[in-house]
Image (spheres, grey):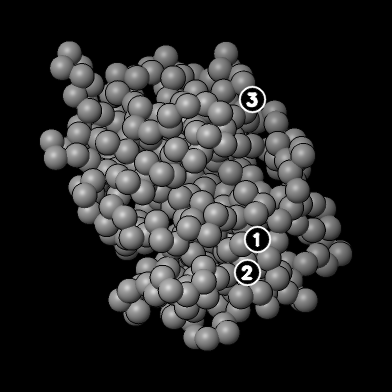
């Protein structure tokens, strides 16, 4: 029994991993020992909790996310947390605003442009609390800091989530743990991880439908696809159908952080090129385009893990490869796919 009330509402307490109404993950999954031995709190070292206040505007909340370099944060009120806001929610509102406005008035200042678009679907002066989980892709779910990474991985897989809010023994929010964090731990202990020498094809991970967009189409169409289909990235293909680059929801963060709304006017390939070029300069690691976001069907899981952690991506596109070096996309590989493949060997 918990005697002290933390900042989370009773509704959110019901989202704890231990509640009986939770759907159990398949019993066939047996996670590597390193995930059983590592506590959630151990991967939060150095992480500064980021929250947004419920009375902030959507633009202000978006700026908080962008400046902190995070993709999501809990929305805090005087009585507790109301939900989450992330870039899927921001993209959802952007597209809703563009559909309502039909165009962007580039004569306005950046903040006024963004405010007009984001508030079109919520009403003038609306606060971010109305945007909580509006995309319905990654709701707020809580896990206690003393739980293991196995507990976190199982919970995210069974509920199709990418991240969880972590609380201490007083129910105080102390950070976010994601599937990416778990993958980093696995990469550091590959000697304890099964299946990593198998190829993507051998693991049966070529089943996901590939969503692509011609490179000469407006980048807004890529955002629409992501919002409508509730996906986090779209492959951009050239005239031959070969993978040229990738547009993802994380690119929305770059637009807001750098006040570059006019980028939404360009085609998908030019947009991705500008975003990747900026990231390469910031990270000082050179060009960061197609090869970094794709793997062959014969790529081993160990190499896919290295690539995902290196580029800080949630998913990679799978290309045919082979003797003719075909770069036509034939599948999508996500972090959750890899973790399931590793755990299924038990």
- 119 shown above or below 28: below
Q: Secondary structure at mark 2?
A: helix
Sequence-first disc among 3 and 1: 3
Q: Residues within 10 Å of mark 2 (few under 14, many from 20)?
A: some
Q: Which residue is mark 2?
A: 60
| Extreme residue in the left direction | 240
The one of 269 and 230 positioned closer to us in this rendering: 269
Q: Is residue 19 left or right of residue 235?
A: right
- 269 shown above or below 135: above
Q: Is residue 341 visible?
A: no
The answer for how far apart the CA atoms under marks 3 and 2 are is 39 Å
The mark lying in front, picked from 3 and 2, is 2
What residue is shown at x 46% (from left), y 50% (from top)? 251
Locate the N terminus and report the quarter of the image it occupies. Answer: bottom right
Q: Quadrant of residue 323?
A: top left
- Marking on residue 31: none
What residue is shown at x 63% (from left), y 69% (from top)? 60
State if disc 2 and disc 3 touch (CB < 8 Å). no
Q: Is residue 90 left or right of residue 77?
A: left
- Marking on residue 34: 3
The one of 205 and 276 positioned closer to us in this rendering: 276
The picture places residue 64, in percent across and down from the top left corner, at: 65, 60
Q: Which residue is mark 1?
A: 64
The picture places residue 157, in percent across and down from the top left corner, at: 49, 45
Q: Is residue 179 visible?
A: yes
The answer for how far apart the CA atoms under marks 3 and 1 are is 34 Å
């Amino acid at each position: 029994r918990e005697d002290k009330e933390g900042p989370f509402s009773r509704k959110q307490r019901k989202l704890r991993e231990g509640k009986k109404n939770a759907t159990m993950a398949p019993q066939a999954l047996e996670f590597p020992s390193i995930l059983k031995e590592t506590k959630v709190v151990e991967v939060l070292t150095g992480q500064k909790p980021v929250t947004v206040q419920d009375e902030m505007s959507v633009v202000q909340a978006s700026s908080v996310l962008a400046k902190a370099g995070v993709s999501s944060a809990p929305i805090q009120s005087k009585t507790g947390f109301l939900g989450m806001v992330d870039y899927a929610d921001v993209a959802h509102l952007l597209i809703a605003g563009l559909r309502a406005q039909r165009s962007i008035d580039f004569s306005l200042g950046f903040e006024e442009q963004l405010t007009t678009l984001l508030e079109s679907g919520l009403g003038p002066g609306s606060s971010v609390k109305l945007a909580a989980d509006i995309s319905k892709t990654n709701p707020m779910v809580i896990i206690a800091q003393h739980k293991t990474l196995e507990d976190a991985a199982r919970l995210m897989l069974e509920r199709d989530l990418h991240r969880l809010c972590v609380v201490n023994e007083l129910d105080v929010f102390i950070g976010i743990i994601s599937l990416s964090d778990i993958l980093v731990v696995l990469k550091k202990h590959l000697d304890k991880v099964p299946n990593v020498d198998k190829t993507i094809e051998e693991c049966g991970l070529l089943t996901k439908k590939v969503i692509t967009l011609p490179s000469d189409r407006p980048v807004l169409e890529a955002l629409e696809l992501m919002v409508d289909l509730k996906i986090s990235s779209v492959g951009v293909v050239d005239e031959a159908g070969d993978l040229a680059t990738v547009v993802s929801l994380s690119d929305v963060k770059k637009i807001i952080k750098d006040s570059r709304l006019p980028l939404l006017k360009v085609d998908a390939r030019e947009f991705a090129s500008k975003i990747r070029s900026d990231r390469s300069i910031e990270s000082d690691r050179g060009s960061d385009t197609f090869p970094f976001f794709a793997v062959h069907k014969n790529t081993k899981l160990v190499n896919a893990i290295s690539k995902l952690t290196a580029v800080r991506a949630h998913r990679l596109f799978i290309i045919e490869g082979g003797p003719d070096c075909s770069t036509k996309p034939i599948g999508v590989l996500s972090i959750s796919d890899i973790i399931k493949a590793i755990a299924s060997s038990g």
